[in-house]
Image (tube, rainbow, N blue to C red):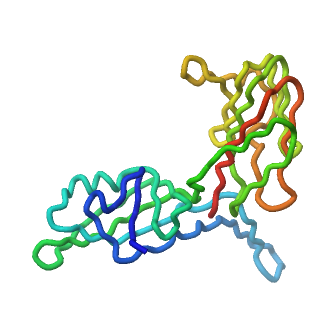
Amino acid sequence: MRNTVTIDGVSSADVGLHFDKLPYIPAAKRRSNVYQIPGAGEDLTIHSDDYDDIPLTLTAYMRPGTDHQAAYNWTHGKRIVLSTQPTVYGIIKVVGEIAPSRIGWDAHKFDIPFTLSPFKYRRANEPVLLTSAGQVKTDGSVYSLPVYHLAGCFGDVVLTVNGISLTITDAPQDVYIDTASQTVYTITDGAKVNIMQTTSGRFWAMVLVPGTPENYVSWEGTVGSVEITKNERWV
């Protein structure tokens, strides 16, 4: 398999970079708090829901005639895909110092130190459409933070996910619930309009959990459909 790195849809080959070998994106490390208990035989370890950022250093080779500045600019994108894991992407937070070294007369070698957000995301993030209450299966190794799109709303409506309910008073026709950014909004003339003042409930807790039993989504009031963009994640 040809080793390529794609950042924001642009392949490393397009900017004149070559990789002899590529790793997989490492798994994120879960944070833990350790407490010493007087008289106990061992410490108490409590795992949190937080994960450390992922360090990833890639060794690239720059071919003769490559536009150095274009290659450097390419590294400062946002979404990175390795050909070793073509179905998921990571999110670049920081790019460290890049110091090229000469190989032979013309070629250059350099290490690119990335810092990625803790999770990997599915590239094919296709929404699931529900026209009646039902179960939603999600993959991944950690809970996902979905976006719910309620279409065809009228009056007061209630959305319930795994027993957690959100009430929307006098809902507009389209309602978007973004659990990651913790906002509820509608779209007017192409712009997001916050409507959280008309809502009640812990919508930020409406996460989707992988495994079984599958997640259950239901609603009350006039809602034509619920479209769910799952945003599945892996550590």
Where in the figure is residue 110, as x and y percent of width and height?
27, 70
Q: Quadrant of residue 5?
A: bottom left
Front one among 229 and 116: 229
Whether residue 82 sits left or right of residue 198 in the image: it is left
Q: Residue at x 53, y 56 (%)?
A: 117
Where in the figure is residue 80, as x and y percent of width and height?
45, 57
Q: Residue at x 49, y 59 (%)?
A: 116
Q: Quadrant of residue 119?
A: bottom right
Q: Residue at x 61, y 49 (%)?
A: 125
Asked if residue 81 is positioned above or below residue 149 in the image, the reply reads below
Where in the figure is residue 121, as x and y percent of width and height?
59, 56
Q: Residue at x 18, y 77 (%)?
A: 103
Where in the figure is residue 97, as x and y percent of width and height?
31, 62
Whether residue 28 sits left or right of residue 12 in the image: it is right
Whether residue 233 sits left or right of residue 44 in the image: it is left
Extreme bottom residue here? Answer: 41
